[in-house]
Image (cartoon, rainbow, N blue to C red):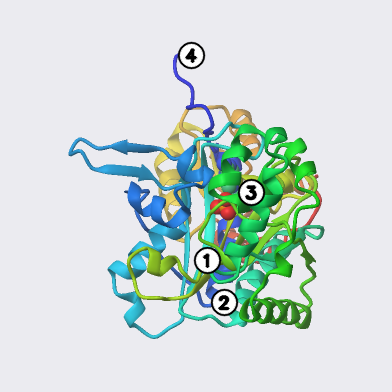
Amino acid sequence: MGYKAPRGTRDILPQEASRWHILEEKFKELCYIYDFAEIRTPIFEETELFVRSVGEESDVVKKEMYAFKDRGGRELALRPEGTAGVVRAYLEHGMHNITQPVKIFYYGPMFRYDRPQAGRQRQFYQMGIEVFGTKEPSADVEVIKFTAEFFFKLGFKNLKLHINSVGCPQCRPSYQEDLKEFAREKLSSLCPDCQKRALLNPLRLLDCKTESCRNLMNDSPQIDGYFCNSCREHFSEVLKLLKVLNVSYYVDPRLVRGLDYYTNTAFEFISENIGAQGSLGGGGRYDNLVESCGGPPVPGVGMAVGVERIVLAMEKEEFSLGKNEPEGVFLAIDGHDFREEGLIMLYSMREKGLRAEIDYLNRSLKGQMKFAHRSGFRYVIILGREEKLKNEVKLRDMLKGEQLELSYEEALIFLIAERGHTFFRGMSPCSEKNN
Ligand code: AMP
């Protein structure tokens, strides 16, 4: 075999894709309920947009961005995250001039050149929501509650919500100064990246994955001692409202996020079952982002979850994204004479919205039954000489192993009624164990 998917990417094969669909449906259903409308932005943007928003000194921009010049010499980058493009579109299309808040969701692939490992890829999918135009703590809570509910609906019961406030440009600098001072004493023991962070972006010292750095920073000053009044009030209101809504949380004073645009609230939903890359999703407030992308001062808050990591965690926790139950109907034709009649039946079933299939390889009846079973069809309609003489078909339930003889019209009515059942089964919360 000559070609392989590029390192850090993977194919989502049909079987897995059907599980992704369920996840996507749940997300979109919740967006509808919470009144978020979809936006689709390009996969690449001007590199400068990410530099200005995500932050020049962030790892994402400095080390992980797929940046390139196109044939016209433009500096472009594959998007490493979704918010920057959404902010660009929000401004470009004058959404700051319409009634606020503007509530938007997005879904699509993101790209980061990082060392691949379980739960970390170079192309991965994020689903995210953004709320523009309100500073209210209730908007932060809306985004967190949405995320908590999304995970709950998928069947997660043991995720931990870590939450912190990263302050604002008024109160953060004195904290950063003290953090820098603290790190200066330990500079030679820190990893080379942290030695740079200590000078350029001290908050990021708290986010180093190296064990020795984490230990060294363990008793660093904590940001809550530095909050200005407005940051303190905002954070305590967010926590109060979370309590009111029964969302349990863990205040983690060392939680900072990989993107530099956050102000005030920052949060992550962590799974303890999938190893180092345990964050399934996270987000926070970004009150200065719109302005730093060239717009007026518009506050915002949002979050993104990673699809691959959620699927991985669900596999580890041994619950499935709904069962792959057999459904639909396979039309088995016993003898060439009925081929044309069979095709008419096939398309009439499809017209009625039934998942329906036929044999294309001239298999024997036995071969067709085997194929139908392997392909996950719940029913088989058998049309052959014997049935034709009686103006009937056989309808076989592959799950129960039962068989009926009835007219084709009766079989069709039965299958349409059954599809209604399957539909409702598919809509039920899916926290069942994998069988
Ligand atoms: P971030 O945009 O860094 O806040 O990440 C939000 C979520 O996206 C994380 O919690 C992960 O679920 C997912 N994610 C981030 N980076 C990657 C990656 N390299 N591979 C897979 N998922 C990722």
Q: Which mark is residue 34?
A: 2
Circle 4 sits on which residue? 1
Helix, strand or loop at mark 3 = strand
Residue 324 visible: no
State the residue at coordinates (70%, 64%).
Answer: 223
Where is residue 186 drawn, in percent x and y?
72, 40
- Given the image, on which type of amino acid does mark 2 rest? Tyr
Helix, strand or loop at mark 4 = loop
Q: Depth-wise, is mark 2 or mark 1 nearer the camera?
A: 1
- Given the image, on which type of amino acid does mark 1 rest? Ile
Where is residue 432 drawn, in percent x and y?
79, 55
Tell which of 379 and 319 is nearer to you.
Answer: 319
User: Is residue 206 depicted above or below 150 in this figure?
Assistant: above
Is there a contact, CB below 8 Å, between mark 4 and mark 2? no
Q: Depth-wise, is mark 4 or mark 1 nearer the camera?
A: 1
Between the C-alphas of marks 4 and 2, the distance is 47 Å
State the residue at coordinates (62%, 76%).
Answer: 142
Q: Earlier in the sequence, mark 2 or mark 1?
A: 2
Tell which of 298 and 7 is nearer to you.
Answer: 298
Q: Depth-wise, is mark 3 or mark 4 nearer the camera?
A: 4
Residue 164 visible: yes
Circle 1 sits on which residue? 129
Q: Depth-wise, is mark 3 or mark 1 nearer the camera?
A: 1
- Given the image, on which type of amino acid does mark 3 rest? Tyr
Between the C-alphas of marks 4 and 1, the distance is 41 Å
Q: How crowded is the residue under tag 1: few (<14 C-alpha within 10 Å), some, or many (20+)?
A: many
Q: Earlier in the sequence, mark 3 or mark 1?
A: 1
Circle 3 sits on which residue? 379
Tell which of 67 and 327 is nearer to you.
Answer: 67
